[in-house]
Image (cartoon, rainbow, N blue to C red):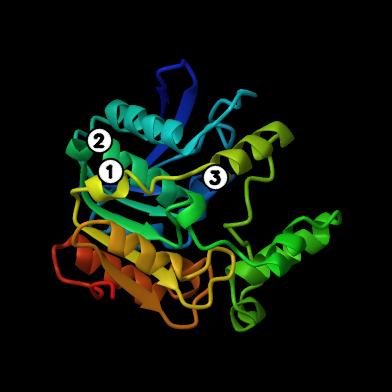
Amino acid sequence: MGHATAADGVRLAWQSEGSGPPLVLLAGQSNTHAWWDGVRADFSTRHRTVTLDWRGTGDSDKPDEPYSTRGFAEDVVAVMDDAGIDRADVYGTSMGGRVAQWLAARHPDRVGRLVLGCTSPGGPHAAERDAEVRGSLADADPRRVRAALIALMYSPEWTARHDGPYRTLGDPRMPAHARRRHLAASNRHDAWDALPGITAPTLVVHGTADRFNPASNAPLLAARIPDARVLLIEGARHAYFEEYRSVAGPAVLRFLAGEEVGERPG
């Protein structure tokens, strides 16, 4: 739908669907807006949904220079400006949830309600994935890495019924340098000290069977953000929003409509 220009001149592709109160949807690491394709229609019936291709992905520029989750948050502001949006609800998942933390903390006037999905605060306070998962993702065989990633995203029951496309496995057109930059940005994320300053009503959503980003990060985030609530989806893995669409989507929509969803941490 358009290209915004970031403060450093990088061009950022963004997309818009639907009408109503604006909702910014933020995808995971190394992914384009296609991350949301399987569920976007659920939100576009009630909201103007706005997505972007992160720098380094899709139709956005791909500079070979350091990226950061703070910088990605400023890219989101540039997209909102270009789309004519002063204030929006924000739903960020995985690395998009990390970016959303900075967006809400640094630009409270731009964020209405906030949903943080399958994400973490980063830094030394975060719960890290286990050694087995790290090893599987570092395998030299890309076919085994892809199989491991699918298993981390979806249950065997889901993949037995759905043979693709799997929208959460990364942008296949992404250059190697941008993949490395995305990984470094996500790994260096640490918003722990900024979280208490978030003023947006916040819902933290996580699947209980998520090993890619352990579910124990959800109560950590919810306890750190004032008045946040946490919603755990039993049995869901990292791509809970897609496999458990019938649970997650309506819950998020109720929260965005102002209803109480989830529980207080602790």
Q: Relative to residue 108, is residue 160 drawn left or right? A: right
Residue at the image point whose x is 59% and y is 79% from the top: 158
Is 171 situated above or below 120?
Answer: above
Q: Name the residue under label 2.
A: 107
- Could you tell me which secondary element the residue under label 1 belongs to? helix
Q: Which amino acid does label 3 sit on?
A: Ser
Is 178 situated above or below 226?
Answer: above
Q: Mark 1 points at which residue?
A: 104
Residue at the image point whose x is 58% and y is 57% from the top: 167
Q: Position of residue 125 (x, y in %)?
A: 46, 56
Residue at the image point whose x is 37% and y is 30% from the top: 74
Is 249 situated above or below 41?
Answer: below
- Could you tell me which secondary element the residue under label 2 belongs to? loop
Q: Where is residue 198 in the image (x, y as percent from the top left)?
A: 24, 47
Q: Are marks 2 and 1 in contact (CB under 8 Å)?
A: yes
Q: What residue type is labelled 1?
A: Ala
Q: Do the residues labelled 3 and 1 touch (CB within 8 Å)?
A: no
Q: Earlier in the sequence, mark 3 or mark 1?
A: 1
Q: What residue type is labelled 2?
A: His
**One can see residue 224 in this view:** yes
Figure label count: 3
**One can see residue 22 in this view:** no
Q: Position of residue 208 (x, y in %)?
A: 47, 77
Tell me the crowding category of disc 1: few under 14, some 14 to 19, or many 20 or more residues within 10 angstroms, Cα based. Answer: many
